[in-house]
Amino acid sequence: MHLQFFVRSPNHQTLTVALEPTQSLTLHHLKSSLLPEPQLLSSFYFTLNGKPLSDSTLLPNSQLTPLSTLFLVPRLSGGGGDGGATGAESRDCYLKMYAVKKPDKVDPNEQRLGKWLNCALSNEPLREPCVIDKLGNIFNKEALVQALLGKKLPKEFRHIKGLKDMVNIKLSIIPGKESDAADGATFQCPITGLEFNGKYKFFALKNCGHVVSAKALKEVKSSTCLVCHKEFAESDKMVINGNEEEVAVLREMMEEEKAKTAKEKKKRGIDVVDREKGCGKLEGNGKLENEKALSNGGVKKFRAANLAPANATKEVYASIFTSSKKSNFKETFTCRSLPLGRN
């Protein structure tokens, strides 16, 4: 019984090859019988199911079963003929090569979701209580406080010095979702129902902490919170995970607030120093009364004559104190007696 194979030529003709059961030949011999010119032998090769076959492949073999179809394909010009870039690679190789994701590329959708669903510090899923800093980054409060206590804050979060640099926020959980769910968004806008997943802009109100979408604030014109109806100013709106321009505006506001606070502290410190420089004036009843500092900033010198009691001469009262009147008399260690008229 003959073994039959089919050969599809480059001009789309199908040829039948019949072999005796004991007969065997290589693909090189088969190609020589099909191509009359010897110089064309190196310009063609056989493929089976899209995979190239070597010219030394025997017929029949385990790959070439009876009634298999071989394709005689011309080699593409420009290759070196060594199998490197000859066009002999199968389509499956290309598909596998491009199917593998390169490690240096990050899916932008996953990056966006991670920024809105996870803590900016610990990368853990957001769970209440949550806070934001003055640049709109969102954190799990417990993770941020632990990093502050352990002094392990990364460089990009060094502007957070303590609790005064955090804003406590209130997120609305999607009904039926758990706060630590790992699949998809967990929170939503309490007014419009838009998911907290980065596709929509959200604001946090500093005065009450409620987080609502920009769409809700735009459609409902109000100066009060749409959740708790507490009054808020335009400066109380803080955008969450804003773009570069929005973060730059928040950073400028943060620096202005720090400068204003430092100026107020410095002013209070100067006032305290001025009060300390004020001289004390002792009244006749023994009470000390604050007096304005002298024009030269010095402290007024104490004089006993200024504290003379009522109905007393200042000079007589001052004579009690030796420091109040200078004398030309000088005592020595040999004689300490006073001259006549001074006893």
Image (tube, rainbow, N blue to C red):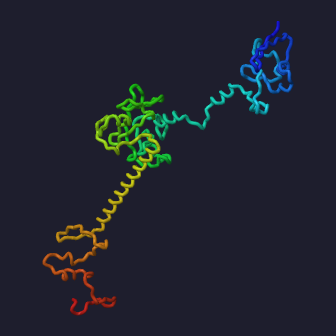
Farthest front residue in view: 11
Farthest bottom residue in view: 340
Location of the N terminus (image quadrant)? top right
Tally of numbered tags: 0
Kindly identify the residue that appears in the image at 33 percent across and 40 percent down: 208
In the image: residue 337, left or right of residue 47: left
User: x and y percent of residue 174 in the render?
Assistant: 40, 28
Kindly identify the residue that appears in the image at 31 percent across and 44 percent down: 233
Farthest left residue in view: 311
User: x and y percent of residue 297 in the render?
Assistant: 31, 71
Is 71 placed above or below 21 here? below
In the image shown, does 55 or 276 lie closer to the viewer? Answer: 55
In the image shown, does 217 or 110 lie closer to the viewer? Answer: 217
Is 273 placed above or below 64 here? below
User: x and y percent of residue 312 in the render?
Assistant: 15, 79
Asked whether residue 239 is in view, the answer is yes
Kindly identify the residue that appears in the image at 32 percent across and 42 percent down: 207
Is 287 placed above or below 114 here? below
Q: Which of the 4 image quarters holds residue 192? A: top left
Location of the C terminus (image quadrant)? bottom left
In the image shown, does 229 or 316 lie closer to the viewer? Answer: 229
User: x and y percent of residue 230 in the render?
Assistant: 29, 39
Asked whether residue 160 is in view, the answer is no
Q: Which of the 4 image quarters holds residue 132? A: top left
Kindly identify the residue that appears in the image at 31 percent across and 89 percent down: 330
